[in-house]
Image (tube, rainbow, N blue to C red):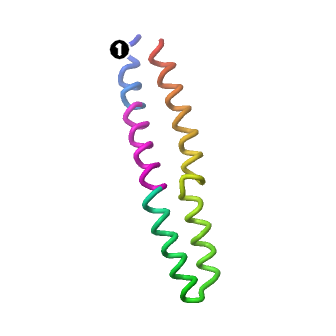
Amino acid sequence: MKIILFPIILLLSILIAFLKFIIKVSGMIISFLVFIGAVACFIQNDMVTGMVALLLAFLISPYGLPKIALWITAYLEVGKDTLREI
C-alpha cells in the first residue's frame, strides 16, 4: 500500500514546497511594487486607480490572500501526513 501512495506523497510534498515559495515571494515583492504604483497614481491625482491599487496591495500582502493560501497549504500537509501514516 505504501508503494502505491509514495508518488502521491511525493507530489504533495513538491506542491507544498512550491506553494510556500510562491506565497513568500508574492507577499513581499509584488505587494511592494503594487504599493509603489498606488503612490504614483496618487501623485498623478488618479484617486480611483490609487485606491484600487491599495486594495490589491493589501490582498497580495502577507495579511490578505496569502493567509488563505497558507491555510490551504496546512490542510494539504495534514493530508500528506495522513497518507504517510497509512
User: Regarding mark 1 in the picture, which secondary structure is present there?
Assistant: helix
Q: Main secondary structure of the magenta part?
A: helix
The residues colored magenta run 13-27
Residue at the spot x=54%, y=45% of the render? 69
Residue closer to the observer: 28 or 17: 28
Return the residue nearer the eye: 61 or 9: 61
18 is within the stretch colored magenta: yes
Location of residue 12 with respect to 43 vertically, above or below: above
Q: Position of residue 37 (x, y in %)?
A: 49, 76
Residue 68 horizontal/vertical position (percent): 59, 45
- Residue 2 magenta-highlighted: no
Q: Which residue is mark 1?
A: 3
Amino acid at circle 1: Ile
Residue 15 coordinates in the image, percent (x, y): 41, 37
Query: What residue is drawn where x is 49% and y is 62%?
Result: 31
Eyeballing the image, is 19 above or below 31? above
- Indicate the quadrant containing the N terminus: top left, top right, bottom left or bottom right: top left
- Residue at the location (56% across, 39% down)? 72
Most extreme residue toward the bottom is: 44
Q: Position of residue 51 (x, y in %)?
A: 63, 75
Crowding near the residue tagged with mark 1, few <14, some 14–19, many ≥20 C-alpha atoms within 10 Å = few
